[in-house]
Image (cartoon, helix red, strand yellow):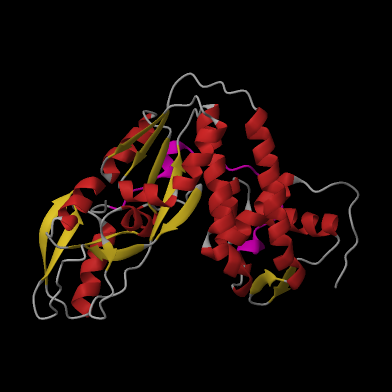
Amino acid sequence: MTRRKTDAGDLELRLLRTFLTLMECGSLGKTAAIVQITQSAVSQQMLRLERIVGLKLFLRGRNGISLTRQGELFIEDAIRAVALNDEILMRFRTDCTTGPVTLGMTTSIAMAGIAPVLRRFRNIRPKAELRISTANMSKVTDLLVSGKIQLAIAETSTVSKVPAAAWQVHLEWAAPKTLEINPSHSLPLVLFDPPCSWQESLFGSLRQAGRDWHIAFTSNSIDAIVAAADSGFGITALPREIIRKSGLVPVCDRGLPAISGIEFGLYVGRDLSESARTLVELLQSSTSNSRGPLSSCSARNIDHRESQEAHGLKVEKVTVREEIAVDAGKC
Protein backbone atom coordinates (compact mmCIF):
# COMPACT_ATOMS: atom_id res chain seq x y z
CA MET A 1 0.00 0.00 0.00
CA THR A 2 1.40 3.35 -1.06
CA ARG A 3 1.17 5.97 1.67
CA ARG A 4 1.55 9.66 1.14
CA LYS A 5 2.50 12.55 3.35
CA THR A 6 -0.65 13.59 5.19
CA ASP A 7 -2.16 16.99 5.92
CA ALA A 8 -3.27 17.64 9.48
CA GLY A 9 -7.04 17.77 9.83
CA ASP A 10 -10.16 15.75 9.21
CA LEU A 11 -11.80 14.67 6.00
CA GLU A 12 -13.67 17.49 4.27
CA LEU A 13 -17.13 16.63 3.00
CA ARG A 14 -16.79 18.91 -0.02
CA LEU A 15 -13.76 16.91 -1.12
CA LEU A 16 -15.66 13.66 -0.69
CA ARG A 17 -18.58 15.02 -2.71
CA THR A 18 -16.26 16.10 -5.51
CA PHE A 19 -14.55 12.70 -5.42
CA LEU A 20 -17.88 10.84 -5.73
CA THR A 21 -19.08 13.16 -8.47
CA LEU A 22 -15.85 12.53 -10.38
CA MET A 23 -16.33 8.78 -10.00
CA GLU A 24 -19.91 9.14 -11.19
CA CYS A 25 -19.16 11.28 -14.24
CA GLY A 26 -15.76 9.92 -15.21
CA SER A 27 -14.86 13.37 -16.50
CA LEU A 28 -13.17 16.38 -14.96
CA GLY A 29 -15.21 18.68 -17.17
CA LYS A 30 -18.58 17.23 -16.17
CA THR A 31 -17.54 17.16 -12.52
CA ALA A 32 -16.51 20.80 -12.66
CA ALA A 33 -19.87 21.74 -14.18
CA ILE A 34 -21.82 19.91 -11.46
CA VAL A 35 -19.87 21.21 -8.44
CA GLN A 36 -19.47 24.62 -10.15
CA ILE A 37 -15.70 25.03 -9.93
CA THR A 38 -12.99 24.91 -12.57
CA GLN A 39 -11.41 21.71 -13.81
CA SER A 40 -8.06 22.66 -12.27
CA ALA A 41 -9.83 23.22 -8.95
CA VAL A 42 -11.23 19.68 -9.18
CA SER A 43 -7.68 18.37 -9.68
CA GLN A 44 -6.42 20.43 -6.73
CA GLN A 45 -9.21 19.10 -4.51
CA MET A 46 -8.32 15.51 -5.39
CA LEU A 47 -4.65 16.14 -4.60
CA ARG A 48 -5.66 17.59 -1.23
CA LEU A 49 -7.89 14.57 -0.55
CA GLU A 50 -4.96 12.24 -1.21
CA ARG A 51 -2.79 14.26 1.19
CA ILE A 52 -5.44 14.13 3.93
CA VAL A 53 -6.06 10.40 3.52
CA GLY A 54 -2.37 9.65 3.16
CA LEU A 55 -2.99 7.25 0.30
CA LYS A 56 -2.55 7.39 -3.44
CA LEU A 57 -6.10 7.24 -4.79
CA PHE A 58 -5.34 7.88 -8.46
CA LEU A 59 -2.89 6.64 -11.05
CA ARG A 60 -1.87 9.44 -13.38
CA GLY A 61 -0.55 8.49 -16.79
CA ARG A 62 -0.28 9.60 -20.39
CA ASN A 63 -3.85 8.48 -21.14
CA GLY A 64 -5.45 10.09 -18.10
CA ILE A 65 -6.11 9.07 -14.52
CA SER A 66 -7.72 5.98 -13.04
CA LEU A 67 -8.34 4.66 -9.55
CA THR A 68 -5.81 2.69 -7.57
CA ARG A 69 -6.93 -0.29 -5.51
CA GLN A 70 -7.02 2.02 -2.46
CA GLY A 71 -9.14 4.47 -4.45
CA GLU A 72 -11.66 1.75 -5.26
CA LEU A 73 -11.94 0.79 -1.59
CA PHE A 74 -12.26 4.45 -0.61
CA ILE A 75 -15.47 4.88 -2.66
CA GLU A 76 -17.62 2.90 -0.21
CA ASP A 77 -16.30 4.81 2.81
CA ALA A 78 -16.85 8.15 1.07
CA ILE A 79 -20.43 7.19 0.23
CA ARG A 80 -21.14 6.26 3.86
CA ALA A 81 -19.63 9.47 5.21
CA VAL A 82 -21.58 11.73 2.85
CA ALA A 83 -24.83 9.81 3.35
CA LEU A 84 -24.54 9.98 7.15
CA ASN A 85 -23.87 13.71 7.03
CA ASP A 86 -26.86 14.29 4.76
CA GLU A 87 -29.20 12.19 6.89
CA ILE A 88 -28.25 14.05 10.07
CA LEU A 89 -28.67 17.48 8.50
CA MET A 90 -31.97 16.65 6.85
CA ARG A 91 -33.37 15.13 10.03
CA PHE A 92 -32.70 18.20 12.16
CA ARG A 93 -32.86 21.01 9.63
CA THR A 94 -35.78 23.37 10.13
CA ASP A 95 -38.16 23.26 7.19
CA CYS A 96 -38.82 26.79 5.96
CA THR A 97 -41.22 25.65 3.25
CA THR A 98 -43.80 28.27 2.30
CA GLY A 99 -45.30 26.32 -0.57
CA PRO A 100 -45.26 23.01 -2.41
CA VAL A 101 -42.29 21.39 -4.10
CA THR A 102 -43.11 21.69 -7.79
CA LEU A 103 -41.63 19.21 -10.25
CA GLY A 104 -42.24 18.86 -13.97
CA MET A 105 -41.36 15.79 -16.02
CA THR A 106 -41.60 14.73 -19.63
CA THR A 107 -42.96 11.25 -18.89
CA SER A 108 -44.31 9.57 -15.78
CA ILE A 109 -42.08 6.56 -16.52
CA ALA A 110 -39.30 8.49 -14.79
CA MET A 111 -41.12 8.01 -11.47
CA ALA A 112 -40.32 4.29 -11.56
CA GLY A 113 -36.64 5.04 -11.03
CA ILE A 114 -37.06 7.33 -8.02
CA ALA A 115 -39.86 5.69 -5.99
CA PRO A 116 -37.48 4.71 -3.13
CA VAL A 117 -36.18 8.28 -3.00
CA LEU A 118 -39.71 9.66 -2.78
CA ARG A 119 -40.41 7.34 0.16
CA ARG A 120 -37.32 8.65 1.95
CA PHE A 121 -38.35 12.21 1.15
CA ARG A 122 -41.78 11.57 2.67
CA ASN A 123 -40.22 10.20 5.85
CA ILE A 124 -37.88 13.18 6.24
CA ARG A 125 -40.39 15.85 5.18
CA PRO A 126 -43.79 14.42 6.22
CA LYS A 127 -45.52 17.83 5.99
CA ALA A 128 -44.15 18.76 2.58
CA GLU A 129 -46.47 18.90 -0.42
CA LEU A 130 -45.09 17.51 -3.67
CA ARG A 131 -46.80 18.61 -6.91
CA ILE A 132 -45.80 16.73 -10.07
CA SER A 133 -46.98 17.62 -13.55
CA THR A 134 -46.27 15.99 -16.91
CA ALA A 135 -45.79 17.96 -20.13
CA ASN A 136 -43.69 17.98 -23.29
CA MET A 137 -40.05 19.01 -23.11
CA SER A 138 -40.62 22.53 -24.38
CA LYS A 139 -43.32 23.21 -21.79
CA VAL A 140 -41.28 21.75 -18.91
CA THR A 141 -38.31 23.90 -19.93
CA ASP A 142 -40.43 27.07 -20.06
CA LEU A 143 -41.85 26.34 -16.62
CA LEU A 144 -38.40 25.81 -15.12
CA VAL A 145 -36.88 28.89 -16.72
CA SER A 146 -39.80 31.08 -15.64
CA GLY A 147 -39.61 29.81 -12.06
CA LYS A 148 -43.08 28.25 -12.14
CA ILE A 149 -41.57 24.90 -11.20
CA GLN A 150 -38.50 24.29 -9.04
CA LEU A 151 -37.30 21.00 -10.52
CA ALA A 152 -37.53 19.18 -13.83
CA ILE A 153 -36.93 15.58 -14.90
CA ALA A 154 -36.20 14.74 -18.53
CA GLU A 155 -34.30 12.25 -20.66
CA THR A 156 -30.65 13.28 -20.62
CA SER A 157 -30.44 12.61 -24.36
CA THR A 158 -32.79 15.54 -24.98
CA VAL A 159 -30.88 18.04 -22.81
CA SER A 160 -27.44 19.47 -23.56
CA LYS A 161 -26.43 20.33 -19.98
CA VAL A 162 -25.17 18.02 -17.24
CA PRO A 163 -27.98 17.11 -14.79
CA ALA A 164 -27.74 17.51 -11.02
CA ALA A 165 -28.48 13.77 -10.76
CA ALA A 166 -29.16 10.99 -13.26
CA TRP A 167 -30.51 7.45 -13.13
CA GLN A 168 -31.44 4.59 -15.42
CA VAL A 169 -34.95 3.19 -15.85
CA HIS A 170 -34.90 -0.32 -17.32
CA LEU A 171 -37.73 -1.36 -19.63
CA GLU A 172 -39.08 -4.77 -20.61
CA TRP A 173 -41.63 -5.99 -23.11
CA ALA A 174 -44.92 -6.74 -21.35
CA ALA A 175 -48.31 -8.16 -22.30
CA PRO A 176 -51.15 -10.17 -20.74
CA LYS A 177 -50.64 -13.91 -20.40
CA THR A 178 -53.36 -14.55 -22.95
CA LEU A 179 -51.83 -12.47 -25.74
CA GLU A 180 -50.47 -14.64 -28.54
CA ILE A 181 -47.53 -13.18 -30.46
CA ASN A 182 -47.14 -14.60 -33.95
CA PRO A 183 -43.73 -13.80 -35.48
CA SER A 184 -45.28 -13.82 -38.95
CA HIS A 185 -47.89 -11.17 -38.04
CA SER A 186 -47.49 -7.45 -37.46
CA LEU A 187 -46.71 -6.70 -33.82
CA PRO A 188 -49.43 -4.54 -32.16
CA LEU A 189 -47.83 -1.86 -29.98
CA VAL A 190 -49.31 0.02 -27.02
CA LEU A 191 -47.32 3.22 -26.74
CA PHE A 192 -47.03 6.64 -25.16
CA ASP A 193 -48.11 9.68 -27.13
CA PRO A 194 -45.39 11.06 -29.43
CA PRO A 195 -42.98 12.72 -29.64
CA CYS A 196 -40.80 10.49 -27.49
CA SER A 197 -37.16 9.84 -28.30
CA TRP A 198 -36.80 6.48 -26.56
CA GLN A 199 -39.77 5.07 -28.50
CA GLU A 200 -38.14 6.20 -31.74
CA SER A 201 -35.12 4.09 -30.73
CA LEU A 202 -37.51 1.21 -30.05
CA PHE A 203 -38.90 1.46 -33.59
CA GLY A 204 -35.38 1.36 -34.98
CA SER A 205 -34.58 -1.80 -32.98
CA LEU A 206 -37.71 -3.51 -34.30
CA ARG A 207 -36.77 -2.63 -37.87
CA GLN A 208 -33.26 -3.99 -37.39
CA ALA A 209 -34.74 -7.20 -35.98
CA GLY A 210 -36.95 -7.51 -39.07
CA ARG A 211 -40.21 -7.30 -37.13
CA ASP A 212 -43.26 -5.69 -38.68
CA TRP A 213 -45.26 -3.58 -36.25
CA HIS A 214 -48.19 -1.20 -36.03
CA ILE A 215 -49.49 1.16 -33.35
CA ALA A 216 -52.65 -0.17 -31.74
CA PHE A 217 -53.08 2.29 -28.86
CA THR A 218 -51.48 5.49 -27.57
CA SER A 219 -51.87 7.54 -24.40
CA ASN A 220 -49.83 9.77 -22.11
CA SER A 221 -51.04 7.90 -19.01
CA ILE A 222 -49.28 4.86 -17.57
CA ASP A 223 -52.58 3.61 -16.15
CA ALA A 224 -54.17 3.80 -19.60
CA ILE A 225 -51.18 2.04 -21.17
CA VAL A 226 -51.40 -0.80 -18.63
CA ALA A 227 -55.18 -1.08 -19.06
CA ALA A 228 -54.94 -1.18 -22.85
CA ALA A 229 -52.23 -3.82 -22.83
CA ASP A 230 -54.14 -5.85 -20.24
CA SER A 231 -57.23 -5.66 -22.48
CA GLY A 232 -55.32 -7.29 -25.31
CA PHE A 233 -54.65 -4.27 -27.52
CA GLY A 234 -51.03 -5.32 -27.88
CA ILE A 235 -47.59 -5.44 -26.35
CA THR A 236 -45.95 -2.54 -24.53
CA ALA A 237 -42.63 -1.53 -22.99
CA LEU A 238 -42.70 -0.59 -19.31
CA PRO A 239 -40.37 -0.36 -16.31
CA ARG A 240 -39.92 -3.61 -14.41
CA GLU A 241 -41.45 -2.11 -11.28
CA ILE A 242 -44.70 -1.27 -13.07
CA ILE A 243 -44.91 -4.69 -14.73
CA ARG A 244 -44.56 -6.41 -11.35
CA LYS A 245 -47.44 -4.37 -9.89
CA SER A 246 -49.74 -4.82 -12.90
CA GLY A 247 -51.52 -7.81 -14.31
CA LEU A 248 -49.04 -7.98 -17.18
CA VAL A 249 -46.13 -10.40 -17.53
CA PRO A 250 -42.70 -9.97 -19.14
CA VAL A 251 -42.57 -11.23 -22.73
CA CYS A 252 -39.60 -13.48 -23.42
CA ASP A 253 -39.63 -13.74 -27.19
CA ARG A 254 -36.38 -14.30 -29.05
CA GLY A 255 -37.78 -12.44 -32.01
CA LEU A 256 -38.13 -9.21 -30.02
CA PRO A 257 -35.10 -6.93 -29.65
CA ALA A 258 -33.76 -6.05 -26.22
CA ILE A 259 -34.87 -2.65 -24.95
CA SER A 260 -32.23 -0.16 -23.90
CA GLY A 261 -32.64 1.60 -20.58
CA ILE A 262 -33.64 5.26 -20.44
CA GLU A 263 -31.41 7.70 -18.59
CA PHE A 264 -33.31 10.48 -16.85
CA GLY A 265 -31.77 13.57 -15.31
CA LEU A 266 -32.80 16.07 -12.65
CA TYR A 267 -32.48 19.75 -13.58
CA VAL A 268 -32.69 22.41 -10.89
CA GLY A 269 -34.32 25.83 -11.07
CA ARG A 270 -33.88 28.79 -8.78
CA ASP A 271 -35.21 29.79 -5.33
CA LEU A 272 -35.51 26.26 -3.96
CA SER A 273 -37.32 25.69 -0.68
CA GLU A 274 -35.66 23.58 1.99
CA SER A 275 -37.94 20.69 1.03
CA ALA A 276 -36.93 21.01 -2.61
CA ARG A 277 -33.25 21.04 -1.62
CA THR A 278 -33.84 17.92 0.45
CA LEU A 279 -35.33 16.12 -2.57
CA VAL A 280 -32.37 17.17 -4.73
CA GLU A 281 -29.88 15.94 -2.10
CA LEU A 282 -31.68 12.62 -1.74
CA LEU A 283 -31.67 12.08 -5.51
CA GLN A 284 -27.99 12.99 -5.75
CA SER A 285 -27.10 10.67 -2.86
CA SER A 286 -29.18 7.80 -4.21
CA THR A 287 -27.96 8.00 -7.80
CA SER A 288 -24.31 8.39 -6.73
CA ASN A 289 -24.65 5.24 -4.63
CA SER A 290 -26.40 3.10 -7.21
CA ARG A 291 -25.66 4.11 -10.79
CA GLY A 292 -23.59 1.78 -12.92
CA PRO A 293 -20.70 4.19 -13.65
CA LEU A 294 -19.90 4.44 -9.95
CA SER A 295 -19.06 0.77 -9.67
CA SER A 296 -17.30 0.55 -13.02
CA CYS A 297 -15.45 3.85 -13.09
CA SER A 298 -12.14 2.26 -12.04
CA ALA A 299 -11.96 0.63 -15.45
CA ARG A 300 -12.48 3.93 -17.23
CA ASN A 301 -9.82 6.59 -17.53
CA ILE A 302 -10.69 10.19 -16.77
CA ASP A 303 -9.82 12.56 -19.60
CA HIS A 304 -6.37 13.90 -18.81
CA ARG A 305 -6.60 16.74 -21.31
CA GLU A 306 -9.22 18.42 -19.15
CA SER A 307 -6.71 18.77 -16.32
CA GLN A 308 -4.43 20.99 -18.39
CA GLU A 309 -6.43 24.11 -17.52
CA ALA A 310 -4.45 26.81 -15.72
CA HIS A 311 -4.40 26.54 -11.94
CA GLY A 312 -6.70 28.69 -9.87
CA LEU A 313 -10.07 28.54 -8.15
CA LYS A 314 -12.99 30.21 -9.85
CA VAL A 315 -16.67 29.62 -9.18
CA GLU A 316 -18.63 29.40 -12.40
CA LYS A 317 -22.15 30.79 -12.14
CA VAL A 318 -24.74 28.94 -14.21
CA THR A 319 -28.04 30.65 -14.90
CA VAL A 320 -31.32 28.78 -15.17
CA ARG A 321 -31.54 29.52 -18.88
CA GLU A 322 -28.18 27.85 -19.37
CA GLU A 323 -29.22 24.83 -17.36
CA ILE A 324 -31.49 23.29 -20.00
CA ALA A 325 -31.15 23.44 -23.76
CA VAL A 326 -33.68 21.40 -25.68
CA ASP A 327 -33.03 19.53 -28.88
CA ALA A 328 -35.97 20.14 -31.19
CA GLY A 329 -38.31 17.27 -31.92
CA LYS A 330 -37.62 15.27 -28.79
CA CYS A 331 -39.98 14.67 -25.92
Quarter of the figure that contains the N terminus = bottom right
Q: Give residue 293's position: percent from left, percent from top.
A: 54, 65
Let me know if residue 220 appears in the view.
no
The image shows residue 99, relative to residue 111, as above or below, that is above
Horizontally, residue 161 falls left or right of residue 146, namely right
Give the residue drawn at x 38%, y 55%.
241
How many discs appear?
Answer: 0
Secondary structure, magenta segment, majority class? loop
Give the residue drawn at x 53%, y 53%.
287
Horizontally, residue 255 falls left or right of residue 185, namely right
Q: Is residue 123 magenta?
A: no
Which of the 4 image quarters holds residue 324? top left
Give the residue drawn at x 9%, y 73%.
186
Q: Give residue 95's position: percent from left, percent from top.
A: 57, 23
Range shown magenta: 306-327
Give the residue drawn at x 52%, y 37%.
121
- Observer-nearest of 328 and 330: 330
